[in-house]
Image (cartoon, grey):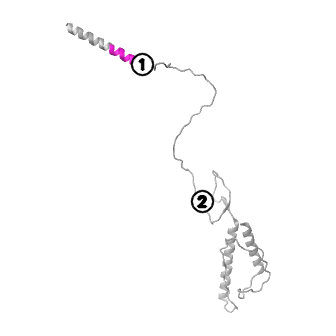
Amino acid sequence: MAINRRLRAVIIAGSALAVVAAVGIGVAVASPSGRPRFVTASAMIGDVTQIYTTSGTITRTNTAAASFAVDGTVSSVKVAVGDTVDAGDVLAVLKKGPLQLAVLDAETSVAEAKATLYAAEHPSSSGTVSGSRSGSGSSGSGSSGSGSSGSGSGAGTGGVTVDPAVLLKVTNQLAAAVADE
């Protein structure tokens, strides 16, 4: 039995030594040497700055496509970002000059077509009508006020009479369109 007692004493002593070593290591790791556990700071008034960096994707929630009846150059925008608009509200204003020139060009085409139709329906009239125009009306070139007040038939008109009032009106419109550009 002497061996049993001796073995038992060694086991108890080894276990006690292991427990003391574990507690010592735990205390040494839990409190770093040379540093106190608590730090006291003075309270003061000041700004606290914290910077957060993140990433993400931004998507629009309300968008609408706008379409316009005619092409042109915008002279002014009548709405701002974030404005609420209804159907029919004016969003932008176009420059008038090119549009007026396009209208004049179309009116000239109609007048030429009417003259050609008249000449075709009345073959007995003397001469022919020639429609030789150049330019698209949007080049911005033109003369202002070449006041021809006569109503006779000029060269190349072949018997077609030009109304001086209509000629003056068209000349003034053309001058206004060019000046507006």
Q: Main secondary structure of the magenta part?
A: helix
Q: Which amino acid type corresponds to the residue marked 2 in the rendered image?
A: Ala
Q: Is residue 125 above or below residue 70?
A: below
- The quarter of the picture where residue 45 lies is top right
Which mark is first along the chain, 1 or 2? 1
Residue 82 image position (x, y, % from top left): 63, 50
At label 1, counting other C-alpha atoms closer than 10 Å, the crowd grade (few under 14, some 14-19, many 20 or more) is few
Name the residue beneath numbered marker 2.
66
Residue 127 image position (x, y, % from top left): 69, 90
Which label sits on residue 28?
1
At label 2, counting other C-alpha atoms closer than 10 Å, the crowd grade (few under 14, some 14-19, many 20 or more) is few
Cα gap from disc 2 to disc 1, whole angstroms: 73 Å
Residue 92 image position (x, y, % from top left): 66, 59
Q: Is residue 107 magenta?
A: no
Q: Is residue 106 above or below residue 88?
A: below
The kind of secondary structure element at disc 1 is helix
Taking the view exactly as shown, the residue that stands out farthest to the top is: 2
Q: If the image is split into quadrants, where does the N terminus sit? A: top left
Residue numbers of the magenta segment: 17-26
At 31% from the left and 14% from the top, the residue drawn is 15
Q: Which amino acid type corresponds to the residue marked 1 in the rendered image?
A: Ala
At 63% from the left and 25% from the top, the residue drawn is 44
At 65% from the left and 63% from the top, the residue drawn is 73
- The quarter of the picture where residue 94 lies is bottom right
Q: Nearer the viewer, residue 85 or 173?
A: 173
Q: Nearer the viewer, residue 165 or 6?
A: 6
